[in-house]
Image (cartoon, rainbow, N blue to C red):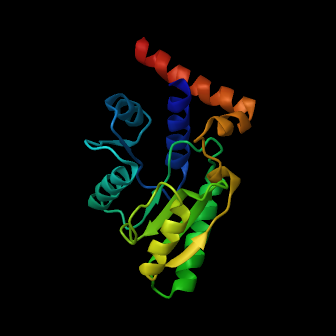
Amino acid sequence: ETLLLGMLLHAVGIVRSWPPCERVHVVTTDPEVCDVATVAGARAVLQETDGLNEALVLGRETATAAGATAILVLPADLPYLTIEALDRLLDAADAAVAAGAGRPVVVIAPAGARGGTSALLLSPPDVIEPRFGTSSLEAHIREAASADASVQLVADHALGFDLDTPEDLERLEPATLAALIERGASRLASTVE
């Protein structure tokens, strides 16, 4: 639990401190995570149904209702996420706009070597449907092609390293793991006091 909270706080903190970001929405089925997200400065959105893609659609709808013309979809399990990595996504979006001649933009960060997706930058927000799950990278590329979007891929360790398996946890640098656990433990301790 402390690691999960630490990763959430890390991700929200990085995204909130990224200058191009106007709002952060955290979609979850857990009311306690809603509380943590709100304290961290995000808008918490309680999901009443199950499913990651359903959560992303709910987040997209919430962001669009708040006036978003583009969205960045990120999971909270990116322990090496940095502002510089987010800047690389934005640079790729700028390249997609330049190459696209007015077409919609889809920027995808592949997740490691498993054929997944770690980040999606979409403009407009509904240019494609989220297809996270098995072989999501391929599914997102196909969706983008069907939408005639200008597509860019950003292969970046800070975006591509996610914690999905016990093997991922073993590959995580001990200092990073300790820092994330400490951040989560501090949050838990502050809720007890």
Residue 136 horizontal/vertical position (percent): 51, 60
Extreme residue toward the top, this view? 193
Look at 35% across and 34% down and name the residue there. 34
> In the image, is 123 to the left or to the right of 93?
left
Q: Along the line of sight, which residue is nearer the eye, 171 or 46?
A: 171
- Residue located 26% across and 59% down the image: 65
Side (left or right) of 186 relative to 125: right
The image shows residue 39 at horizontal and vertical percentages of 40, 32
Coordinates of residue 74 in the picture (x, y in percent): 50, 52
Viewer-nearest residue: 101 or 142: 142
Quadrant in the rendering for residue 91: bottom right
Q: Position of residue 104 (x, y in %)?
A: 44, 78
Write the residue at 50% across / 37% down.
8
Point 49% across, 64% down: residue: 121
Rendered-image quadrant of the C terminus: top left
Identify the residue at the far bottom of this view: 101
Figure disc tally? 0
Left or right for 25, reference 179:
left
- In the rendered image, the vertical position of residue 127 relative to residue 188, given as above or below: below
Position of residue 34 relative to residue 16, above or below, is above
